[in-house]
Image (cartoon, helix red, strand yellow):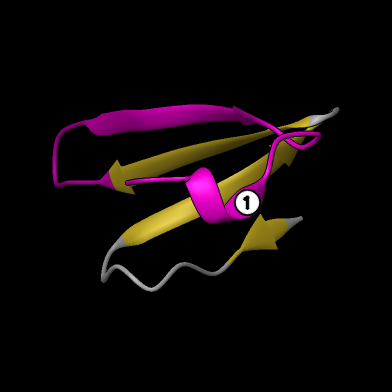
């Protein structure tokens, strides 16, 4: 399941109990953060 973010180009992917936030470029993918879902979402900074 994908998660929308307020940052343009940043995507989130649910993997078990974690969200993997990433950005896709022409030749590579950059992982920005791995976030455990039990954490307070207001503390997430991308």
Range covered by the magenta-colored residues: 24-46
Residue 22, quarter of the rendered image: top left
Residue 35, quarter of the rendered image: top right
Residue 41, above or below 22: below
Tell whether 26 sits left or right of 32.
left
Horizontal and vertical percent position of residue 2 = 66, 58
Residue 5, above or below 31: below
Tell whether 4 sits left or right of 36.
left
Tell whether 35 sits left or right of 22.
right
- Residue at the extreme left: 26
- Name which residue lies at 32% across and 46% down: 46
- Name which residue lies at 33% across and 33% down: 32
Tell whether 14 sits left or right of 10.
right
Horizontal and vertical percent position of residue 38 = 81, 34
Residue 41, above or below 19: below
Residue 41, above or below 20: below
The residue nearer to you, when weighing 46 against 13, is: 46
Q: Is residue 2 magenta?
A: no
Horizontal and vertical percent position of residue 39 = 71, 35
Q: Secondary structure at mark 1?
A: helix
- Name which residue lies at 28% across and 64% down: 9
Residue highlighted by disc 1: 41
- Quadrant for the N terminus, please: bottom right
- Name which residue lies at 48% across and 45% down: 44
Q: Is residue 36 magenta?
A: yes
């Amino acid at each position: 399941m994908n998660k929308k973010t307020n940052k343009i180009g940043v995507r989130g992917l649910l993997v078990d109990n974690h969200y993997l936030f990433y950005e896709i470029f022409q030749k590579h993918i950059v992982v920005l953060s791995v976030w455990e879902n039990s954490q307070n979402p207001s503390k997430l900074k991308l």
